[in-house]
Image (cartoon, rainbow, N blue to C red):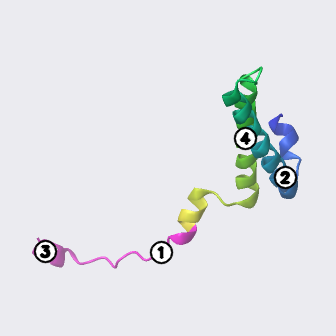
């Protein structure tokens, strides 16, 4: 699936696609272990599609790890000490 096609989908549709791909990936892995999978490249393609969708969901939700860090960090910098006090401390 192309990224340009995925960008047009809503958050709900992306969530549905992600759950479908997870289920499909699970089934592919089972078939690979059982030895009935004809093309092992299907697993790789499925993983990449899932990663694309999860990345777009993160971008659309604005819920990236960096954004959470910035939101959690409050401007609580300690007040600057005068130079005389800094020299006395070990």
Q: Nearer the viewer, mark 4 or mark 1?
A: 4
Query: What secondary structure prevails in the magenta region?
Result: loop
Q: Which sits earlier in the primary sequence, circle 2 or circle 3? A: 2
Residue shown at 10% from the left, 76% from the top: 88
Q: Which sits earlier in the primary sequence, circle 1 or circle 2? A: 2
- The Cα atoms of the two marked residues, 3 and 4, are separated by 60 Å
Determine if the magenta segment contains residue 86. Answer: yes
Read off the residue under disc 2: 16
Q: Which sits earlier in the primary sequence, circle 3 or circle 4? A: 4
Read off the residue under disc 4: 26
Read off the residue under disc 1: 75
Looking at this rendering, what residue extends furthest in the top direction?
Answer: 38
Residue shown at 20% from the left, 74% from the top: 83
Q: Which sits earlier in the primary sequence, circle 4 or circle 1? A: 4
- The Cα atoms of the two marked residues, 1 and 2, are separated by 39 Å
Q: Nearer the viewer, mark 4 or mark 2?
A: 4
Read off the residue under disc 3: 89
Residue shown at 66% from the left, 30% from the top: 33
- The Cα atoms of the two marked residues, 3 and 1, are separated by 25 Å
Determine if the magenta segment contains residue 26. Answer: no
Q: Position of residue 47 (x, y in %)?
A: 70, 36
Q: Nearer the viewer, mark 2 or mark 3?
A: 2
Other-residue count near label 4 (Cα within 10 Å), few / some / many at <14 / 14–19 / ≥20: few
Q: Quadrant of residue 53?
A: top right
- The Cα atoms of the two marked residues, 4 and 2, are separated by 16 Å
């Amino acid at each position: 699936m192309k990224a340009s096609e995925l960008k047009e989908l809503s958050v709900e549709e992306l969530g549905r696609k992600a759950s479908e791909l997870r289920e499909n990936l699970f089934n592919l892995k089972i078939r690979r272990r059982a030895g009935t999978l004809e093309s092992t490249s299907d697993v790789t393609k499925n993983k990449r599609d899932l990663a694309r969708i999860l990345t777009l969901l993160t971008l659309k939700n604005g819920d990236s790890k960096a954004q959470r860090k910035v939101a959690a960090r409050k401007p609580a910098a300690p007040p600057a000490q005068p130079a005389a006090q800094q020299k006395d401390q070990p």
